[in-house]
Image (cartoon, rainbow, N blue to C red):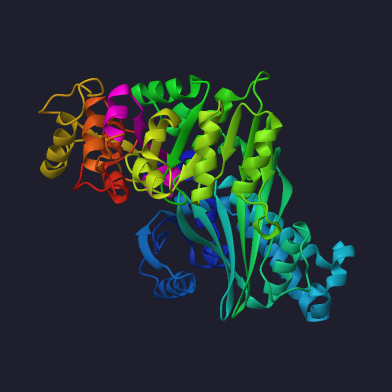
Amino acid sequence: MANAPNSEQNRIPPDVLILIPEDSARHYKMIPMALSGNVLDVGLVDPNDVKAQEALNFLASRNGLVARISQISEEEWAGLIKQYAGLGEEVGEALEGLRKELAQEKEKMISPEAKGKPEQNAPIIRMVETILKHSVESRASDIHIEPMMKKLRVRFRLDGSLQTVVVLPIEIAPAVVSRVKILADLQIDETRRPQDGRFTAKIGDKEIDLRVAVLPTARGEKVVMRILDPTTGLKSLQELGIVGRNFEVVERGIKKPFGMILMTGPTGSGKSTTIFGILQILNTDMVNIISLEDPVEYYVDGVNQSQIRPELGYTFASGLRQILRQDPNVIVVGEIRDSETAGLAVQSALTGHLVLSTLHTNDAIGVIPRLSDMGVEPFLLPAALNVALAQRLVKKLCPDCKKEVEPAEAAKQLILKNIESMPEISRPKIKKEGFKIFKAQGCPKCANKGTRGRIAVFEILEMTPQLEKIIVSKPTEADILGEAKRQGMITMLQDGIMKVLEGTIGLEELVQVVNINNDSEE
């Protein structure tokens, strides 16, 4: 390691630092550096120290990891060890206090009466607060608290992947779960049924909403907390990755006084985030926006947000009927799940409303046959549909360690093939020889992963007069795709390749989420 050990650029992520306790790190002069998959990179002053190796292997295996050792100088180690001022120390102090308290009053720690006596639960309170704080600092989207046979595992979902951040004694599982239930105003003594709730926590200078789901399992209750940070959850369309001609197409669809704008893609592909990006453009004093959501995630001023409750008969379909009596300009339907909702959404779009919703199809072209399968008459679709967007999330290259490289021959041919097949209106100009792409080797700022954050790749279908003629004649998906490409549409793979050439994402990351064997991704 050539850089100064205590410099900001060698800051170790909190979720990596906590994998080795500070006392072990000091005793054996080791330091966790980065986590890549299930491989934990650890710096050791003396890599030949057998006892240090044994301790490290034990600590790594306890978290389901494999240790990879590199040598660091004593000076580097002394600088890096100072970083144990964060999560490890906080959780350690809370855990030590908890152990003492458990030995004296174990039953009181988990009793329902503790809700009114916070002093009895102080170590647990600090521990849960610490986990919440570091999840936000790490930009995690979810926190998983999972009881196992001999341990309580805490994992964060970072850029779409789950990573173990701390392992706690299984004895404290009921107390940790009870603390979360108290925050979410759930029933502490109900352990046999799933429960859902939410709460708001002030973390630093941020107000963070957390959606809580508790599930009974064979080893105890598992908790998942979805972190809803308004500062990261609400982004502009450009920040989401809708640029160039794609942005122009979406903008045209938004400016129409009525019609449907449909988002499609698998769960977790960012569809709701794209809807909120569009709402930021539409949300003015002159527009009445009403949304039906399941559940409401981000609260947006100016949007009348309503959560459906199917158990009470309040569904997307019944809610949509009620919305139409509220004089809306813009209607947001969280998801079109059935024929009734599809029919109502189309009728709403045809009677002067702008309707935003989501569907589960593989690509933008699939929206048309999917709506037909749900009972929508094909002749209604051209007038009702403005734009269909398909999307996937791809990990972004770390801006601090990415570098230009020569593409391998197979990568080069893949890029050139897709660029050449793009419509001329969207095709970037590149040299057939000598162009570069970007790769990232990993650095402390990205926990040696080479990626940091995510961006979407899109396929955006615009309804045009030429496409209208095709649709009313009951076309195949290939017919629709051919005409859409003639109108200038690019596939998700092609959109991703343009982002590869810009250096935003790596080709390896792109091909993990899109199908490179077809022009239109599955």
Does residue 399 appear in this view?
A: no
On the image, the x and y values in percent for residue 361 come to 38, 48
Q: Is residue 295 above or below residue 255?
A: below
Q: Is residue 446 magenta?
A: yes
Magenta region: 443-471
The quarter holding residue 161 reads bottom left
Between 75 and 507, which is closer to the camera in this rendering? 507
Q: Is residue 262 above or below residue 354?
A: below
The quarter holding residue 233 reads top right
**What residue is drawn where x is 51% and y is 55%?**
157
The quarter holding residue 46 reads bottom left
**What residue is drawn where x is 59% and y is 45%?**
137
Q: How many marks?
A: 0
On the image, the x and y values in percent for residue 447 come to 43, 49
Report whether 410 appears left or right of 258.
left
Q: Is residue 517 above or below residue 96?
A: above
Q: Is residue 459 above or below residue 488?
A: below
